[in-house]
Image: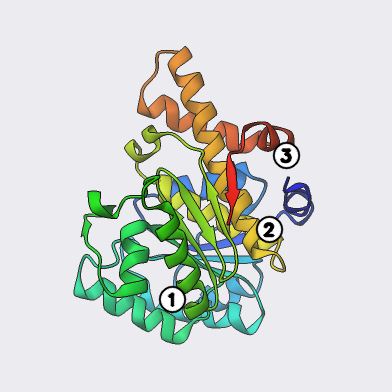
Amino acid sequence: MFEKIFKNLSEVKPVVQCITNFVTVNDCANIILACGGSPTMSHHKGEVEETAACCQGLVLNMGTLYDYDSMILAGRKCNELNIPVILDPVGMGGSALRNKTFEKLSENIKFSVIRGNASEIKRIATGIGSTSGVDAIEKDTITEGNVYDIAAMAKGLSKKMDCVIAVSGAIDVVADEKTACLIRNGHPIMSKITGSGCMSTALLGAFCGANKDDILDACAAAVADMGISGQLAQRKTEKFEGGTMTFRTFLIDYVSTMTTEIINREINIEKI
C-alpha cells in the first residue's frame, strides 16, 4: 500500500515552505527532514513569494497568527503555480480573531488540504464547535461511536471547500467528497507532546508536495506514517522506561526509517 506515494517522496525530495507556529517550528522542520523532504521556514513577507516559487508544498499554520500577510502572499503564489497548500486552522472557534483569519485565508487561497482536530473541522463545517486552547473538548473527540458521522461531515466539507479534509484524533479521518479513510493507528501519548499536530501537518506538506496529482492517498499515507511511527515509538519508549521526551525522539526516528513494508504490516485502515 502507498508504494507509489513513498517512491515519489523519495525521488522528488520535496522542498516544503512552512509559515508555521513558532512554538513548534523546529519540530516541523525535523519531521520534514525525517521523511526525506527539505524544509524552509521562510515567513517574512518580503521573500515568501520568491520562496514559494521554489517549493513543492506550502504549509500554513494558524497556531500563533503572526504572519497573516505572508500566508496570503505565499498561498496566492502557490495557487498560481499549482503547488499544494495545506492549512492547519489551529484553535479555530477559540477566538474571533482566529475565525476571521480563517475566513480571510479561505477567501484568498485555494487549499489542497485542511487538517485539524475534530473541533476545528466541526467549526469550519458547521459554524459550531469549541476549543480549550488548541485541544478539542470531549464532546468533539473522535470515537468508534461517532467516527462515521465525522467521516460524513468531512466528505461534506471536502465538497464545499474543494479540498481534502484530514481530521486528527484517536481515529484519524482523511476524506474527499467521495471517499473517507478511517485510520486506526497512533497512541494516546502523542497528545502529550507539543507539536504532534503541527508535525502531522508538516508531513502532509511533504507527502502532498511529492504527489500533487494524488492528494487523497498522499494524505492517507502521511497520516498512517505518523500514526504508525507513534505506535512504534511508544513500544520502544516503554522498553527503555522513557517518558514523553524519549517518545518524541523515537517518533521522529521512526518517521525517518519508515518503509512501505512497515506501513503494510502495521496499518489499520478502512475506506468508506
Q: Residue at x 40, y 13 (%)?
A: 241
Q: Residues within 10 Å of mark 1 (few under 14, many from 20)?
A: many
Q: Residue at x 37, y 46 (%)?
A: 143
Disc 1, SS = helix
Q: Are marks 2 and 1 in contact (CB under 8 Å)?
A: no
Q: Decide: is 23 above or below 45.
A: above
Q: CA distance from mark 2 to mark 3?
A: 18 Å
Q: Which mark is residue 70?
A: 1
Quarter holding the N terminus is top right
Q: Decide: is 47 above or below 262.
A: below
Name the amino acid type tagged 2.
Answer: Pro
Name the amino acid type tagged 3.
Answer: Thr
Dot in front, 2 or 3: 3
Q: Earlier in the sequence, mark 2 or mark 1?
A: 2
Q: Which mark is residue 260?
A: 3
Quarter holding the C terminus is bottom right
Q: Position of residue 81 (x, y in %)?
A: 66, 80
Task: Tell me which corner region of the image, top left, top right, bottom left or bottom right, holds residue 56.
Answer: bottom right
Task: Tell me which corner region of the image, top left, top right, bottom left or bottom right, holds residue 105.
Answer: bottom left
Q: Position of residue 161 (x, y in %)?
A: 48, 78
Q: Are marks 3 and 1 in contact (CB under 8 Å)?
A: no
Dot in front, 2 or 1: 2
Q: Is residue 87 visible?
A: no
Q: Position of residue 60 (x, y in %)?
A: 46, 66
Q: Which residue is mark 2?
A: 14
Front residue of 6 and 141:
141
Disc 2, SS = loop
Name the amino acid type tagged 1.
Answer: Ser
